Image (tube, rainbow, N blue to C red):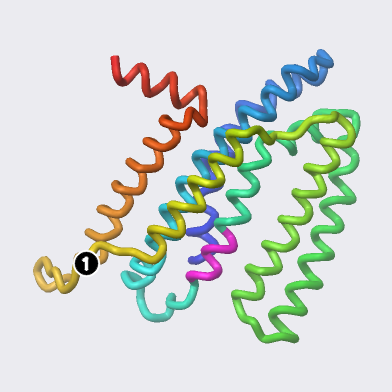
Amino acid sequence: MAVFIGSFIEAPSRAMMNILQPLTSKTLNEENHVEVASLYKKSSINLLLISGLFFVLINANVNQLFNLLPQQYAGGELVVFMISFVKMYNGFLGNNGAIINNSKYYKITLPYSFMMAISVYALNTLFYDQLNMGTDGLALATLIVIFFANTGKLLFVKSKFAMTPFTDKSWRMIGIIAILYVIFNFWDFPLHDIYLWKIPIHQTINIILKSILITGIYFYLVIKLQISDEILRLSKRFQK
């Protein structure tokens, strides 16, 4: 259940990659590295923007969410955080994987995948069986393997294509995500003991109100700091 919740933020990345895959392939075949770099940066900032919003929404409400579930599901908050963090990091890399897969260096993905499989097996054995860390250990193993594997791909693209997905907007976006996570992860609306036909609904109301507040502040900051050109154009259309 925790893995499913944490993986929810990967949905926008999958949808966007279906669009970016043919565009990346086309620009690489044309050896238009300027456009490849542009797609790299645009995909990174927009995927970070969307996955970052889901990351904050999920982790800010995860305690209330688990309170709604049966007692057997308790204790998965840390797993949700680690899985959602690594999924957000995947989004941060934009179309990094598409660049490698559609270039002449595509063969590097096989040894990468093999090393990831060996590493995750070894770490799962260490954390789960030997250190008795339970599901937290499994999530930590996934976090470590995917983080270092994706960082390796990031450095690989930088060395072969002399490009990274980072801009000044990336660090502003990271700042927004970090600040909102810290604020709302430790704060809830002071709602207690609200029942509807003897069913407790105060936790659901808290989740809804916090989500609306977070989303409003999030997009206000994104537009105010001019993080994404696409979001700016969309907001101007709604203003008209």
Q: Specify whether 115 is left or right of 168.
A: right
Q: Quadrant of the C terminus?
A: top left
Label 1 packing within 10 angstroms: few (<14), some (14-19), many (20+): few
Q: How many marks?
A: 1
Is 236 above or below relative to 193?
above
Q: Specify whether 157 is left or right of 223.
A: right
Is 211 above or below relative to 201?
above
| Label 1 secondary element | loop
Magenta span of residues: 77-83
> Disc 1 marks which residue?
190
Does the magenta portion include 80?
A: yes
Does the magenta portion include 91?
A: no
Magenta stretch: dominant SS? helix
Q: Specify whether 85 is left or right of 226.
A: right
- Residue 56: image location, x then y, percent: 45, 53
- Residue 23: image location, x then y, percent: 68, 21
Q: Residue pushed farthest left?
A: 197
What residue lies at 51% left-to-right and 39% top-to-bottom? Answer: 49
Is 8 above or below relative to 68?
above
Residue 84 vs residue 114, the one in the foreground: 84
- Residue 94: image location, x then y, percent: 66, 36
